[in-house]
Image (cartoon, rainbow, N blue to C red):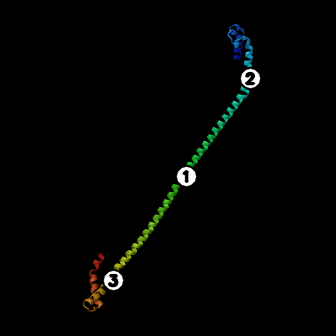
Amino acid sequence: MIKKIFFYLIFLSFLFLKEAFAAESGGMPQLDPEFWVSQIVWLTLTFGILYIVLSKLILPKISTNLEIRKLKILENINAAEKYREESEKKINEYNKIIQDSKSEAKNYFNQERKKILKDIAKKKESSDNDLNEEIKKAEIEIQNLKNKAPEKINKIAIETSGDLIHKLIGVEVNNSSISAIVDDLSKKNKDNYYDN
């Protein structure tokens, strides 16, 4: 409202001050007050049409495009937020799967380790038992050999002595005589055999 009043005052002051703005002598017809009315009409008509074209055709399209763009940006932001949340959820699921896999692998490793250690302990125990049995058998055999050794040694000594005497002297000696001598010597040396 104030702008309209100000505009009318300026317009009227130009009309009443013809002499001050008369520029006929200067060669500028647009400053001649005689042409001001037609200039104002054409100015009003031109800017009125320009205002109508801008306000009814161009500006609504621009504002519509701006609204569409704003909505698109909001949709994109919402979609990006949704995808970010989904990706965080997937990352958390992935990390949980990795953690579960690690703990499962560790448990599996520990179970297999315990199983292998049990198997090793059983095999060691079995090997120890077998080894102890073999040692006992060997000790029994050694003891049997020790027990039978004097008899065999005596038998061999009797046979060898009989053969030697026969070869040396040429006379066959009774085995019972040789046996008595060998038995007597082996009783004397019995302690020496067992100490070694």
Q: Tag 3's secondary structure?
A: helix
Kind of residue at badge 2: Ile
Q: Residue furthest left?
A: 169
Q: Residue at x 52, y 56 (%)?
A: 107
- Quarter placement of the C terminus: bottom left
Kind of residue at badge 3: Lys
Q: Tag 2's secondary structure?
A: helix
Indicate which disc residue 49 carries. Answer: 2
CB under 8 Å between discs 1 and 3: no
Kind of residue at badge 1: Asp
Q: Residue at x 43, y 71 (%)?
A: 130
Q: How much space separates mark 1 and mark 3, taking CA atoms?
A: 75 Å
Mark 1 closeness class: few <14, some 14–19, many ≥20 residues within 10 Å:
few
Q: Quadrant of residue 141?
A: bottom left
Q: Residue 7, percent across and down?
A: 70, 15
Residue to which mark 3 is pinned: 152
Q: Residue 128, percent across and down?
A: 42, 68
Is residue 139 rendered to the left or right of residue 186? right
Q: Earlier in the sequence, mark 1 or mark 3?
A: 1
Indicate which disc residue 41 carries. Answer: none
